Amino acid sequence: MKNSVLNLLTIIVLLAAFGCSSDKPEAAATGDSSAKPKSMVAEEADPMTNKGVGPITSVELGASVDQAMADKGKAVYEAKCMACHKPTEKFIGPAPKGILDRRSPEWVMNMILNPEKMVKEDPIAKKLLMEFNGSPMANQNLTQDEARQVLEYFRTL
């Protein structure tokens, strides 16, 4: 009887140990608890080459931020985007902080200018829609100049 109980306890302990594995093996192996959670969005090989769907095919970013343009972009962002996007935290939509480390400038501008078409045709936008509970981004009817200003503001975050 003792052996049966001991064997049963051993099996339970082993199952518990194997069942509690981390889905971030690199963080578990290094003991790095500061590893950022990955987005549910499965990225393509290099999302920085995806320019999205829309009129923007090329964007030149200066070596430094154009502060006057960024200030205008901040005003546009605060008036039209803040209801759903917090600058540095996930809300109804994703936070724009660090967006240019994850997406091309063209993709960002096309998403701002053409959210409906992007969600229908762009694989990353489709997956983001699902990640954010099917809440589509509202088209705020920004001009290309306003979208470029908002993009410049994003560089300051």
Image (tube, rainbow, N blue to C red):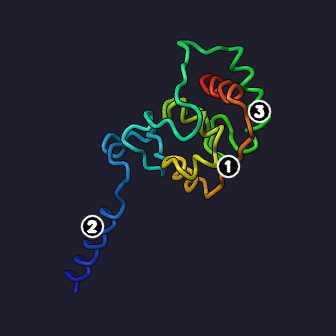
Q: Quadrant of the N terminus?
A: bottom left
Q: Please state if 32 lies on the left or on the right of 86 as rendered.
A: left
The image shows residue 26 at horizontal and vertical percentages of 33, 43
Q: Quadrant of the C terminus?
A: top right
Indicate which disc residue 92 carries. Answer: 1
Answer with the quarter of the image where residue 73 lies.
top right
Q: Please state if 33 lies on the left or on the right of 9 as rendered.
A: right
- Mark 1 and mark 2: span between their CA atoms? 41 Å
Mark 1 / mark 2, whichever is N-terminal? 2
The residue singled out by tag 2 in the image is: 14
The image shows residue 52 at horizontal and vertical percentages of 52, 39
- Mark 1 and mark 3: span between their CA atoms? 15 Å
Q: Is residue 64 above or below residue 59?
A: above
- Mark 2 and mark 3: span between their CA atoms? 53 Å
Indicate which disc residue 72 carries. Answer: none
Q: Amino acid at mark 1?
A: Ile
